[in-house]
Image (spheres, rainbow, N blue to C red):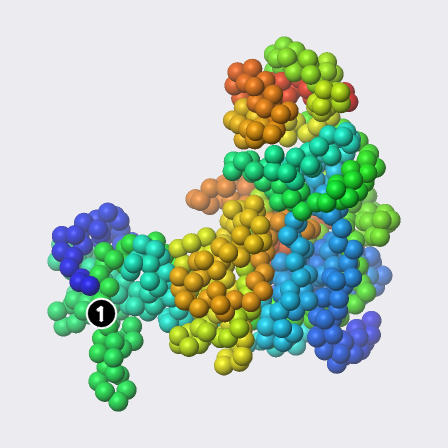
Amino acid sequence: MKKIIAATALTLSSLCNIASLAAEGDVGVAAAMDDRYCNTCHGVEGIGNIAVEAPRLAGMEAWYLKRQLENFRAGIRGTHGEDTQGIAMRSMAAKLSDESITDIVAWAGNWEYVPAEVTVEGNVNQGRTAFQTCAACHGVNAQGNEALGVPALAGQNDWYLITQLRNFRAGFRGSHREDTYGSQMVTMSKTLRDDQAVINVVSYINTLQK
Amino acid sequence: MTNAVSRREFLNLLGAYGGTSAVIQAGTALGFMPSSSRAAEISLQPSAGKKVAILGTGISALTTAWELTKAGYDCTLLEASHRPGGRMFTVRSGTVIDEIGNYQRCEWDNDPHLYFNAGAARIPSIHSSVLKYCKELEVELQVFVNESKTAWIQDDALNGGKPVRNTDYSSSMQGFISEMLTKSFGDSQLDSSLTKSESETLLGMLRSFGDLNEDMLYKGSIRAGYGSGGFLDHGTKKDVIALRDLLKTQLARNVMVTTNEGAGSGPLLMQPVGGMDRIVYAFANRLGDRIKFRCPVTEVMIREDGVEVAYEHNGVTEVLKADYCFNCIPSHLMSGIPNNFPDEYSEALNYIRRGKAYKAAFQAKERFWEKENIYGGITWVNAPTQQIWYPPHNIHGKKGVVLAAYNFGGANYTEMSQEDRIEDLLKHGEKVHANYRQMAEKPITIAWHRMNNMLGCAPRWARNRGGWSEKEEQMYETLRQPVNGRHYLIGDQSTQHSAWMESAIQSAHYALADLDQRVRSEAA
């Protein structure tokens, strides 16, 4: 074995590193550099990644994913200085063409939904009460309502729901004048009295099946 | 400029930092000389046929693959991107920079001298393992110049924003520090703490350190270079920068310690001739088609008798079954890859935070810095771009590549477009060099926390400045133990001194030693 390696090493060193360095550039050029970057942040097949705070895309409604991408691209979302995660999304979405968005939405549609891991524990009973307000739009099972333009909440990463409720409450999301859906959420999120109420309502959403 | 600071002010200043006795106590703890370090001898039991899956191609993975291959193991390396090396990344003509939302292709002149080490860039002389492999794999090295006293420091608050030579600043600061300590010798507390002989030694050193005059005062030094003359005529000293003026910038924290960090940039530094990725390709060329590119890992399952790694290639999912797995995929990316790690292992993985960092560089039309007597080293600027590095190689050549920004943290650059990033580096750079904007060709920028298949720079363990908590130490030990004796986490994430190639290599050596012990005991 060692003999073979020594021989390989000799041949390669005589080729000189330059050959492979040039090849690296060529590979880059030939690469099919499409806009399917989603899984780097959002996890394999969009399962979500808590370590980079990128939410689950698998199982997300196609119409909602499309609207979000378009909103990020237009700067309606992800431009508030305090919306750290939104800014991260915005700098990718800003580059997307209509074709790319169509491609991504179709691609994401193939990702199988798997239930999100529960990471928060609040008072489910108090959360249930608070959720009655949310249910008016998001549905009693938090299943969403396309006709009203509201996404499903059930099945989403709980840490992500908490982040966004905090963002809406603080006005980091939903303050853009063209963010009509977001502005409703800014108002509605304020019916949650404090951060514990946010955790409670998300803990209740965790009990709902997608 | 004047240097009028009263003795009372000096003493008050000293008192604010804990008084002279505190200084002496601290001094006794600073008596260490770094011990010489030696690279580990790797002597693995030959093990023909055992299959090993290696995830990623950072330096820890390449080291692992190289050592195992030499011992007869059957290694496969899965690399998600189009290139090997991870954060050992050299940009030159044709290089693709696959930053999410900011795809770039470098269009500098095709010249071996024109490259930019966008990640790892310096090899300290005490990093014996890196040097061992450079020697073994015949990677030619040259000296890297980290500090140049003729480089600049620039701060809008200092000298009306005009740049000041590092040497003018540091000579004056050194002089005043010496003068201050010397003046405090009247302090009975200090006098009583030292013997006569110790006092004489200290005073002698201080006088020399600060280049003080007969009255033990700092009145300028020719160390800062001559104001005029100095060769055919007697040299004259430059004006002293007043202490109050020196204190207008926070940059002293960087300027005064550039070459003093023992474990990192203190020892003599080196770089491979032609770019840091010469080390990467020295390994990769020898490993040949054992490395599979564009193969992102999609699942890692630890089984009783081995490891199953699923990966995707050209839209098809394949499964690699191996006896062992060595994994240098960044922990924050593993959080998004399905696996069956034990809970406490996952908890520790999720705990490590990803570092953020930003670098930028451009090809300079001319080596304008050489006309300012700069031949390498670092200019410090009080701006988000923070540093400017001048290439120490190809002196007096036509062009050169200048590092135009090196921001630890770098988060603010996430939202900046490429155009804004370029304007940012030009705007800050031209405060130092008037012709900077005209000299800069084809700038490239890299936000490491936005790089595809990477999303981070040096991992961060300790959340408190005070050091590692007990819980952090426990989680670290958890990750150092292989899952089921089969899955090893490697890379600088699996060390207590991230950001250095040496750490990553040593993490590989640590894991290899554990594997070897298991293999030997199985055979026994």
Residue B315: give x, y in percent of width and height: 85, 49
Q: Closer to the camera, B306 or B513?
A: B306
Type of the residue with mark 1: Asp
- Percent position (x, y) of residue A123? 61, 15
Mark 1 Cα within 10 Å, few/some/many (few <14, many 20+)? some
Would residue B385 be found to the left or right of residue B172 on screen? Answer: right
> From the image, which quarter does the N terminus of chain A lie in?
bottom right
Identify the residue at horizontal 70%, vertical 70% (top origin): A21
Is residue B78 placed above or below B163 in the rendered structure?
above
| Figure quadrant of residue B76 | bottom right
Q: From the viewer's perspective, is residue A134 above or below residue B493?
A: above
Q: Residue at x 51, y 72 (%)?
A: B391
- Figure check: A3 above or below B322: below
Q: Is residue A95 visible?
A: yes
The answer to which image quadrant residue B519 occupies is: bottom right
Does residue B339 appear anywhere in the picture?
no
> Which residue is drawn at the image coordinates 70% and 18% (left, top)?
A138
Q: Position of residue B154 (x, y in %)?
A: 37, 60
- Give the residue number, with chain letter if any, for mark 1: B239
Q: Would residue B406 be found to the left or right of residue B298 on screen?
A: left
Q: Nearer the viewer, residue B304 or A24?
A: A24
Residue found 75% across the figure and 20% down from its top: A147
Q: Secondary structure under badge 1?
A: loop
Q: Quadrant of the C terminus of chain A?
A: top right
State the image coordinates of residue A178 (x, y, percent, origin top left). 60, 30
